Image (cartoon, helix red, strand yellow):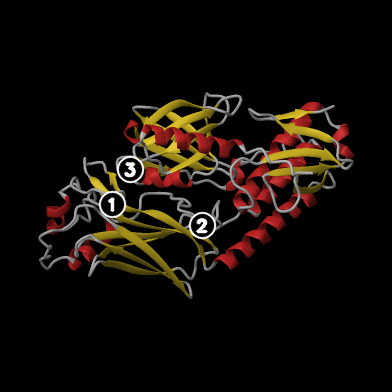
Amino acid sequence: MSKKEKKPLAIETAKRLITIYMKDTGESYKDITQGTIKGKLGNFYICINEQGFRLFKLSANQKEIIQEGQYHWNDFDSVTIDKFATTTLFNFSGKTLLDLKINMPNTFIQSINSQEHIKIEIVSRKWVNKILGFRSKKRWKMVTASIFYSFIALMFIGIANSEPSTEVTAISEPLPVENLAEEVSSNVEEPIEIPEESPTEFEAKLDIEQTDGQVTLTANTNAPDGSIFEMSVLNSNFDIESDFIEVKDGVAAVTFDLSTWDVGYLSAMVNFPFNYDENPQPEAIKTVYGTAGENMTGDLASANNIDGFNGGIQPITFPYPDEKTVKAQTDKIFNEAISEMISLSEGIIVEIMPRLGGNDWRLVDVIVSDNWYYSAPHEKERFAEQIGGLVQQIVLNSGKAEGSISVYFKDTYNKELATPKMLGGYKIKE
């Protein structure tokens, strides 16, 4: 008997269709993620590009992609970023007002950070101020609230939402530059000799080496000697190490001491900016690329806010201190989180396991005890929504699966009790 082929997840289908759409329109993009918009129903698929982002929805039969809107970064002049336990909320202001909630916002945050004209404010709050519970004194709600608090204690601090890729993990605010002006100036006081035929097509490649907590970034480039690169490393705790480095003999290199940082995935970035007032490029470099970088060409050139271009290498995410250590840490915390949820439920949750067996966590079964049958329908639905949401985030944060995670509820006799609806929420079965 042939093995039944798995139906692709909605996010996988959306990414495939959007990729085809963007290719047909001749546009490039950075990433595709999923989120919701205040005032609009259902999930949206967000395609991020240099100029802004497009919003898409899947048709009911999941065979077509429908564009629902398009936004440019110039539509906004400020954004408030509020990171909750399970999502990140973006409140945009400017010509357009938009409230956008995204589950995996890595590339989205990095793209906002590259827009110099957008003022970024990070909401600082205690985790407990983000969570409800213990108000009705009903057992189901108290159990759910207890699991919320446990989930927070077991959040994957320092662990990115995915395995190594070209996605950035998280950025909390524009990269620091104010205190480095004197150092950069001292590096470029002497006249810079530029070859007569310097290329305007910017090229660069980033290499990363690690030794005993020291991370070295090396950018090999065709940019003329004397060019100033901004080189940075950041983690999901919003810690940033950054420095301005002068290109010498076609190389810009810097070493950061990260020995105090937690185990996890880090992101390395290289920027070749022409729109920094405090750390401008030397005049000799501007003669090649233009005052605002307007003469720069190539795949690594992206528009800046002064009608020119900055150069930049796509962020590289890498395990710190190594892949084996990060995976072991992730698996440990994942298993602890699942066990803690079961323990705190006081017998209500019996088991949490992959629906299809093995290590495929895209579909998850939550096995509950007979206490389920003694609760009102609205309490069952609330329990399924909150526990289902927590399980989804634990699976995503641990890297056990990507995209859309579906959580089902069964009793100990394998009878289906609650199944996820296509547009959100749960259908409670009799």
Q: Which of 220 and 178 is in front in this view?
A: 220
Residue 228's tag is none
> Mark 1 = which residue?
311
Identify the residue at image location x=47%, y=72%: 213
Q: How crowded is mark 1: few (under 14 residues within 10 Å), some or many (20 or more)?
A: many
Identify the residue at image location x=39%, y=65%: 207
Q: Is label 3 or label 1 in front?
A: 1
Mark 3: secondary structure: loop
Q: Is label 3 or label 2 in front?
A: 2
Residue 304 position in % (x across, y down): 27, 43
Q: Nearer the viewer, residue 134 or 59?
A: 59
The kind of residue tagged 1 is Gly
Mark 2: secondary structure: loop
Seen in the picture, residue 49 relative to 195 is either above or below; the reply is above
Residue 266 position in % (x across, y down): 48, 59
Left or right, 222 with reference to 101: left
Residue 139 position in % (x across, y down): 81, 38
Seen in the picture, residue 85 relative to 187 is either above or below; the reply is above
> Mark 2 = which residue?
164
Mark 1: secondary structure: strand
Disc with the residue nearer the chain's start (1 vs 2)? 2
Q: How far apart are marks 3 and 1 (CA)?
A: 13 Å
Q: Residues within 10 Å of mark 3 (few under 14, many from 20)?
A: many
Disc with the residue nearer the chain's start (3 vs 1)? 3
Q: Distance between the residues labelled 1 and 2?
A: 23 Å
Left or right, 38 with reference to 97: right
Task: Name the image quarter holding residue 385.
Answer: top right
Residue 115's tag is 3
The kind of residue tagged 2 is Pro
Residue 275 position in % (x across, y down): 23, 48
Seen in the picture, residue 191 relative to 416 is either above or below; the reply is below
